[in-house]
Amino acid sequence: MDILLQVLANGLMLGGLFAIVSVGLTLIFGIVKVVNFAHGEFLMIGMYGTYLVTKALGLHPFVAVIVVVPVLFILGALTQRLLIQPLMASGDDHIQIFATVGLSTALINLALLVFGADIANTPPNGLRMPIEIGPVRVLLGQVVILAAAVVLVVGLHLFLSRTQTGRAIRAVAQNRAAAELMGINVRQIYALTFGIGAACVGVASVLIAPLYPTSPNSGTYFVLTAFVVVVLGGLGSIGGAFAGALLIGLIDSVAGFYIGSDMREVAVFGVFLLILILRPSGLFGARLQLAHVSP
Amino acid sequence: MTTAIKTTTLMPAAAPARPRRETIALALLLAALLAVPVLLDNAFVYHVFVTICVFAALSTAWNIVGGFTGQLSLGHGIFYGIGAYAGVILASLGITPWLGMFVGAGVAVVVAVAISYPCFRLRGPFFSLATIAFLEVFRVLALHFRDLTGGATGLMIPLKIGVEWMVFREKLPPLAIAFGMLLCTLLVAWAVRWRRLGYYLVATRERASAAQAAGVDTVRVRLIAVALSGALTAMVGTFHAMYLTFIEPAAMFSLTLSIQIAMFALIGGIGTVFGPLLGAVLLVPVTELARGWLGAKALGLHGLVYGLVLMLVVLFMPNGLMGLVSRFVRPKAGRGVQAAAVPAAPAAAARPPIGDEIMRVEGLQKHFGGLHVTNDVGFTLREGEILGLIGPNGAGKTTVFNMVSGFLKPDSGTVSVRGPDGTWRQPVSPADFAGLGVGRTFQIVQPFAAMTVEENIMVGAFHRHADPREAREVARETGIRMGLGPWLDAEARGLTIGGFKRLEVARVMAMRPRVLLLDEVMAGINQTDVRRAIDLMLSIRDSGVSIIAIEHVMQAVMSLSDRVIVLNSGRIIAQGRPQDVVRDPTVIEAYLGKEFAHAHA
């Protein structure tokens, strides 16, 4: 019984991790309607940034948030402005896919060139300390991630529903032309959204770096699961992505324990493919939201 | 019309005539792939050229799916890995890779079809994501089943030298095999592209629904494409494994490799037959030279270059190198033919009498959510008859059309069509309807934008003529008859709205339909064109085709229709001769409201 509880607790923690990585991806997909294949590399850059700041200044890794988040916001906004925006008119799917795949390839290899293939370990500063909650043990850093994920999801929800800018962002997502006619600067909204999405993954990277080793491929490792979460959560629904992340975390943990740790990915991707094929609008998505499925 | 046929027989090539210079350049390029290493006689040069041939072949095979059908697979490593593992595992059991590659190809075909069938419902990035996920699953499985694959430690090929093992001491034979495979792949890709299958694939990519209306079984043609592509990729994978002498899951089921394959095609010119070759020839040496000269120092350098090139290409030349080449080499579109008004077919001498029933529609019902869009609609159509379908906006006319052409399944009710052999059938899919000779146009025109006008019409003509030459002839003839003669060689996207409407009709006419469903082909075209379109429809009718026409242009409805059906709010409110129907008070009320109807009562 205790083992099961521990497995579930691990799954929940993992879910928090997936949630915080996926929030930005979901936001960008939901509003700009672009699948950012370079999302994982944004995460990787943030993790290196955290590593460098912590190493250089000897401060707590969380302090790096002051540097990493603005840098990623700018990186995201620039990506939208310089790479995605010029391609939005073409309407060709393959062009947009190749654009972000190209960005992802370039960033991975740039990291390889600059940092080499060696693993960089950010000092954990006590975040790897286990804490006991009833019968289960989890790491302090994991609890922080889960809490931060909740705060981020709630915060984004409030931002999108309560502020003028948030309403403008949602209007653009629902009908770009109509929003433009109402005087909303769509280009600006897109750049802002992309920036916020990247900033979210910046927050994630600062929290993740102390717990996981950083390497040029770190992003790929997390982001494939993040894609699963986004699809599961109903494509652009932030709350759905959060629920999807927890579910995937649990599946990952349970499958890892009961089937074998090397088969975790098969379980996760198996679920993903089933959902994608059987219920392409996602577990929590609205039934009518079928923009990505041919009639 | 006879002159048109003569001109086409002068150029009977299935593929559009390729300027001589391009053919020579291609031959030179291919020859250089063999000649350069032989002349330089350097082991490294040989290696670079083998790698070029392998990647060019992989990329060409990928392009059959990624380019022709537009399904952007980022998981082609699956097939490459299957070929590699099949070859090496069988070789270690004493079976020659020459046989092993066909086993690998067989497995790849099964896997390709099994994976693609459900995934073809997904569009754009989601298809790509699904292929990546499958690739990951395969990699993890290859790691897991170590008894078979050696797991993470990988597999060495058995060290048996000789032609039968595809392992050589000399440098030339591997190059010869790789080159041979490249040639085969190019030939397959070329044959696919310029046969009916290729036109069908491109049509499906451009507009799936229009392709279905032209009788294309869109799922089947795409499955054939992935099967071909997967088999070719697996065979190249077998050879490459034997050449590399060592395989491991991370290198075989690799996302990087899968992206590279796709990237060469994009950079060379996605969807063109020879673009992938060009992309590989240009970029593979960059990788290999970076590795050879800079070694470990340059870790990541070639990848960085790839990524940057990829972004620059999508931003500044999305059609790739081939797009660039054709911009300079190709003559300007249009053949300088005078855009003289081509008269519609001469009025037929006599109208054949209206024949037996050919289509029977009974009790159609359709709900969209709580909205009852079709309520107990039933009618019959007789041979050689023109049936007008009118009604105010939102009456449900197009919904009825979608149900009598297989695009929408009715909640209840039946649509029966009398086949050419006289038996009544109840077709289900658009392809079934097309097979029985029911052709349709779309209210919102659906051209295959990337094809020429002639090729657009050819997609329809293929329905009855599998041979591209015949289809091209029929297409030209039909196009000229529809007054599209001057634009036959121009890209369809450049037509005017009137041109698009005529193209819709031309494409369906090239199918030689028995029943023609026309959805507002006269909306938005000028008076002269309306008169011409009326003449055209009459001549189509007189050739024995039955027509159902949705139309708002009353002049056309009145002069064309033998009978008129009036739909309002999903139900038939009147039917009969056109003169009677327009005087029917319920019809006037439906169009103009109660007060108007009362005022005139």
Image (cartoon, coloured by chain):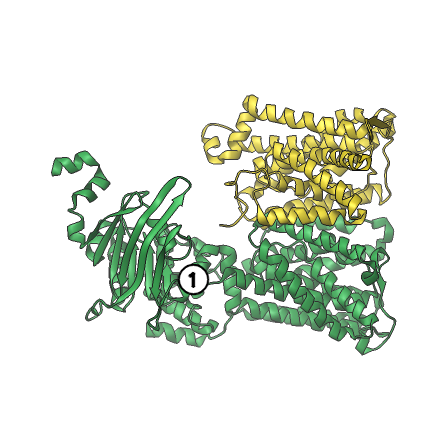
Chain colours: A yellow, B green
The percent coordinates of residue B493 (x first, y second) are 44, 54
Q: Chain of mark 1?
A: B
The percent coordinates of residue B575 (x first, y second) are 21, 52
Q: How many marks?
A: 1
Camera-side residue of B271 and A1: A1
Q: Which quadrant is home to the C terminus of chain B?
A: top left
User: Can the viewer see residue A244?
Assistant: yes
A26 shown above or below B511: above
B468 shown above or below B597: below
Left or right placement of residue B17 versus residue A249 in this view: left
Q: Which residue is pictured at 64% across the width and 36% down the height?
A: A241
Camera-side residue of A58 and B568: B568
User: Can the viewer see residue B321?
Assistant: no
Q: Which residue is pictured at 65% across the width and 34% down the height?
A: A243
The percent coordinates of residue B278 (x first, y second) are 66, 62
Other residues around mark 1 within 10 Å, as few (<14) / some (14–19) / many (≥20): many
Q: Which quadrant is home to the N terminus of chain B?
A: bottom left
Q: Quadrant of residue A84?
A: top right
Q: Secondary structure at mark 1?
A: loop
What amino acid is at disc 1?
Ala
Camera-side residue of B562 and B558: B562
Left or right placement of residue B112 versus residue B574 in this view: right
B173 shown above or below B519: below
Camera-side residue of B303 and A278: A278
A33 shown above or below B582: above
Q: Which residue is pictured at 83% across the width and 32% down the height?
A: A210
The percent coordinates of residue B489 (x first, y second) are 44, 63
Q: Which residue is mark 1?
A: B214
Considering every residue shown, the one lying at the far front of the view is A1
